Image (cartoon, rainbow, N blue to C red):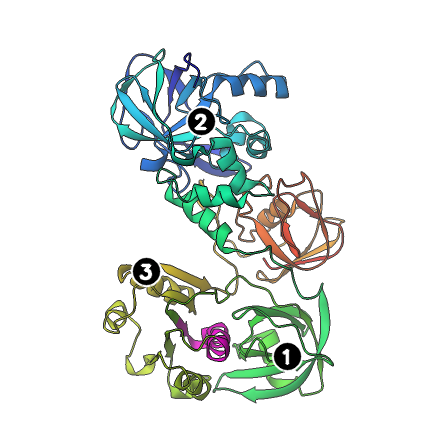
Amino acid sequence: MPSAARLLSVNVGMPKDVAWQGRTVHTGVWKYPVGGPRMVRTLNVDGDGQGDLGGHGGEMRAVLVYQVQSYEHWRRHFGRDDLDHGQFGENFTVDGLPDDEVCIGDRYRIGEAEFEVSQPRVTCFRVGMRFGEPTLPALLVAHHRPGFYLRVIREGHVQAGDEIVRTRTGRHALTVADTDALLYLPGRDMDKLRAAIDIPALSPGWQQSFRELLDTPAPPAGPAWEGFRRLRVTDIVAESASVASVHLAADEPLPPPGAGQYLTVRAAGALRSYSLSSDPAAGTYRISVKREPDGLVSGYLHTKVRPGVDLDVAAPRGEFVLAAGTNPVLLVSAGIGVTPVLAMLHELAARHPDREVWWLHTARDAEHHAFAAEAHELLAGLPASHEHTFYTATGDRLTRDALAGLGLPAGATAYICGPAGFMDAVGAALATLGVTDVHTEMFGSRSAINPGVVGARTTPPHQPAGPPGTGPSVTFVRSELTVRADERSLLELAEACDVPTRWSCRTGVCHTCVTPVLSGTVVHDPVPLEPPGPGEALICSARPTADLILDL
């Protein structure tokens, strides 16, 4: 570390509401220099606060650091001469401590306090919002100048002019810039990923992200076919008073789906998605459909479709998939939510019979209990299986107390499918019982991820205001809406229609907005630093080049 490293400015600011693109964002990115000594405590600098504690702040992200050398870089890049300390939302503007030299786990003494480097800055649209450059989050990563967070090891006063002295070197000497690239850029060095998760000082969130990258042996192969293809209905079977299964086949064996994935079907002039419920290796597909009151497609499949009819079907998709492992598995469902976990049970029975399996299902009553005999037969063939059924009509419910009385293994992986309230309640109850590896599946619109945006709208999806676009058609399947594209990105178009969206950086870096493309093609502008997988789009920078169907 250069001996001249020094604290140039201490910057603070409390969160405030800021108008942005017709919405209100609660943010603490506006920081300004303060004079004299400032007390730095475990959670932040006195007089400072963060608006979104999910992405910023907390013990591991108490203090954000940015370098004056990076200020000079961006002054030249943008031709700006109006950049004051705090412009990048940092608490400490420093001379020295470059991102390509500072390492995760390094410790520094500044004034009376001591700090430990915990992680790079997270990509966030708000730094671009403050700076007036929407692409800045992507540029911070691409130019290897993210800045970094500090954990407070010893509280104390600091002030501008304090010397910065390194007191300890982090394990494995993994720099901030290299750590940032491991998460956000392609061509990852697997040895560095393994080193990263062995650094105790690295924040838990980044450690978890790196573990997930290591646990993924290869990039996804993409959908088994593009767009829609015709599959033949071979049988229709009533499974309960309200559920019927539609069996599908082709002239050749169908590609095996992941256990838990779903199909999107085009029928009766509409698109709907249904989970696959059969053995993934069967060579045929089975979707199981609950008849909904006034349900256009479910009614058509229950009453109009007969064996021999062809249906337009998109390839299997979905991330709610049984993962490899040897630990116990909890398959938890309510009502029609049984379908994806039944496919997982088939997979376990056929290819992983030694795993401990817990089957917990809730139904209204025996008449509405679909697949009771099929599940029971599969479980009977597993030497370490546990089966529990709850009928709500008789007051038997899967409460926390009921779960606690079962003696569930704390190291299990849980897969939950059912109504949103059911999944939320069961997931929360399992967490209190030590089951924290929980995966859920929801049909219909997913909950939005719009960090910092306050006063979320609850308007149902609708056509955008103003004259219709003149571009390709865009169908948001989960929202049951088709519109015409215009010059906006797909994310901006979805927002104009009040389609629930998920995003964070809005510049193609974080991949929070990644969305399956069921049919059609897109172009990304700006081009993302790491492209999405096959059959996917980053809607924050994507625009359609042909009629498009999105699983959104």
The secondary structure type at the circle numbered 1 is loop
For the stretch drawn in magenta, the main secondary structure is helix
Q: Mark 2: which amino acid?
A: Val
Q: Which numbered disc, 2 or 1, marks the residue closer to the eye? A: 2
The secondary structure type at the circle numbered 2 is loop
Place of residue 191 in the rendered image (x, y in percent of width and height, measured from the top left) = 50, 44
Q: Which numbered disc, 3 or 2, marks the residue closer to the eye? A: 2
In this rendering, the answer to whether 523 lies above or below 350 is above
In magenta stretch: residue 211: no
Query: Which sits earlier in the primary sequence, circle 2 or circle 1?
Result: 2
Q: Name the residue under label 3.
A: 428
The secondary structure type at the circle numbered 3 is helix
The answer to whether residue 454 is seen in the rendering is: no
Q: Name the residue under label 1.
A: 283
**Res 137 → quadrant:** top right
* Image position of 531 (left or right of 88): right
* Pointer 3 with pointer 1, Cβ within 8 A: no
The answer to whether residue 292 is seen in the rendering is: yes
Place of residue 297 in the rendered image (x, y in percent of width and height, measured from the top left) = 61, 75
